[in-house]
C-alpha cells in the first residue's frame, strides 16, 4: 500500500520512575477505589477481579494474564503492558492517560465510553475489541489486528492506524475526517459515506469502497 504524507501522531510516552518495586497483585485484593502505584507486576495471573474506580499509576505489567476481570471507571496513568493477555477485560468508562500496550492480546477488550489520551498499541491482537463511544486523542495503532473491532460513534482527535488489519471493523458514527486509512488492510468496513468525508485512503481502497457501497465502476 502507498504511504501517506500525513505527519505521525506525537504520543507522549508513560512517565515512569527509574526503579519500580516488584509486587504480586494476585496475592492482594484489588478492591473498589484501590490506589496502586509505582510497582511492577510480572509472570502471574490475575483472576476474577471485579472492582470499580481502581487507580493504577506509574506501573508496568509484564507477562500478566487477566482472567474474568472487570475494572469499571478505572483510571490508568503512566502504565505499560508488555506481553500481557487482557482478552475480554472490561475497562468501560475508564480513563487511560499515557498508556502503552506492546505485544499484548486485547481480543474482546471493552473500552466502551473510555477517555483515552496518548495511548499506543504496538503489535497487539485486538480482534473484536470495543471502543464504542470512546473519546480518543493522540492514539496510535501499529501492526495490530483489529478485525471486527468496534469504534461506533467514537470521537477521534489524532489517531493513526499503521500496518493494521481492520477488516469488518465498525466505524459507523465515527467521523473519519483527516484519519489516514491508507496503511491499513480491509475487505469490508461498517461505515457510511458521511463518516468517510475527508478520510485519507490509498487508490486501491477506492475500489473497495465502491464495492462496499454497491457502486458500479464503468471501464
Image (cartoon, rainbow, N blue to C red):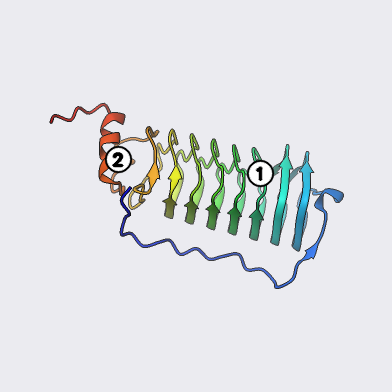
Mark 1, mark 2: which one is toward the viewer? 2
User: What is the quadrant of the C terminus in the image?
Assistant: top left
Looking at the picture, does residue 65 appear above or below residue 4? Answer: above
Q: Mark 1 or mark 2: name the one nearer the start of the chain.
A: 1
**Nearer to us in this view, 84 or 156:** 84
Q: Quadrant of residue 125?
A: top right
Determine crowd level at label 1: few under 14, some 14-19, many 20+ residues with C-alpha closer than 10 A. many
The local secondary structure at tag 2 comes to helix
The local secondary structure at tag 1 comes to loop
> Mark 1 highlights which residue?
86
Disc ID at residue 64:
none
Looking at the picture, does residue 18 appear above or below residue 121? Answer: below
**Residue drawn at x 48%, y 52% as measured from the top left:** 142
Please identify the residue farthest to the bottom as the structure is shown. 18
> Mark 2 highlights which residue?
205
Q: Quadrant of residue 58?
A: bottom right
**Left or right side of 218 for 160:** right
List x then y, in percent, for residue 199. 31, 47
How many marks do you count on the picture? 2
**Nearer to us in this view, 33 or 159:** 159
Looking at the picture, does residue 153 appear above or below residue 20? Answer: above
**Residue drawn at x 25%, y 44% as measured from the top left:** 203
**Label 1 to label 2: alpha-carbon separation:** 32 Å
**Residue drawn at x 73%, y 37% as measured from the top left:** 68
List x then y, in percent, for residue 84. 67, 48
**Residue drawn at x 54%, y 37% as measured from the top left:** 127
**Left or right side of 127 for 197:** left
Amino acid at each position: 500500500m502507498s504511504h501517506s504524507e500525513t505527519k505521525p501522531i506525537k504520543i507522549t510516552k508513560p512517565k515512569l520512575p527509574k526503579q519500580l518495586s516488584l509486587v504480586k497483585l494476585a496475592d492482594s485484593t484489588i478492591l473498589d477505589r484501590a490506589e496502586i502505584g509505582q510497582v511492577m507486576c510480572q509472570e502471574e495471573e490475575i483472576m476474577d477481579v471485579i472492582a470499580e474506580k481502581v487507580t493504577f499509576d506509574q506501573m508496568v505489567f509484564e507477562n500478566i494474564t487477566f482472567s474474568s476481570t472487570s475494572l469499571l471507571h478505572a483510571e490508568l496513568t503512566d502504565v505499560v503492558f508488555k506481553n500481557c493477555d487482557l482478552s475480554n477485560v472490561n475497562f468501560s468508562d475508564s480513563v487511560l492517560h499515557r498508556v502503552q500496550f506492546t505485544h499484548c492480546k486485547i481480543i474482546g477488550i471493552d473500552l466502551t465510553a473510555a477517555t483515552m489520551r496518548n495511548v499506543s498499541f504496538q503489535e497487539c491482537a485486538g480482534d473484536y475489541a470495543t471502543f464504542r463511544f470512546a473519546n480518543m486523542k493522540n492514539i496510535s495503532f501499529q501492526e495490530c489486528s483489529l478485525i471486527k473491532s468496534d469504534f461506533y460513534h467514537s470521537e477521534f482527535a489524532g489517531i493513526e492506524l499503521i500496518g493494521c488489519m481492520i477488516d469488518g471493523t465498525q466505524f459507523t458514527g465515527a467521523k473519519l475526517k483527516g484519519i489516514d486509512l491508507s496503511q491499513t488492510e480491509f475487505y469490508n468496513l461498517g461505515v457510511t459515506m458521511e463518516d468517510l468525508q475527508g478520510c485519507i485512503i490509498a487508490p486501491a481502497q477506492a475500489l473497495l469502497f465502491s464495492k462496499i457501497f454497491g457502486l458500479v465502476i464503468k471501464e
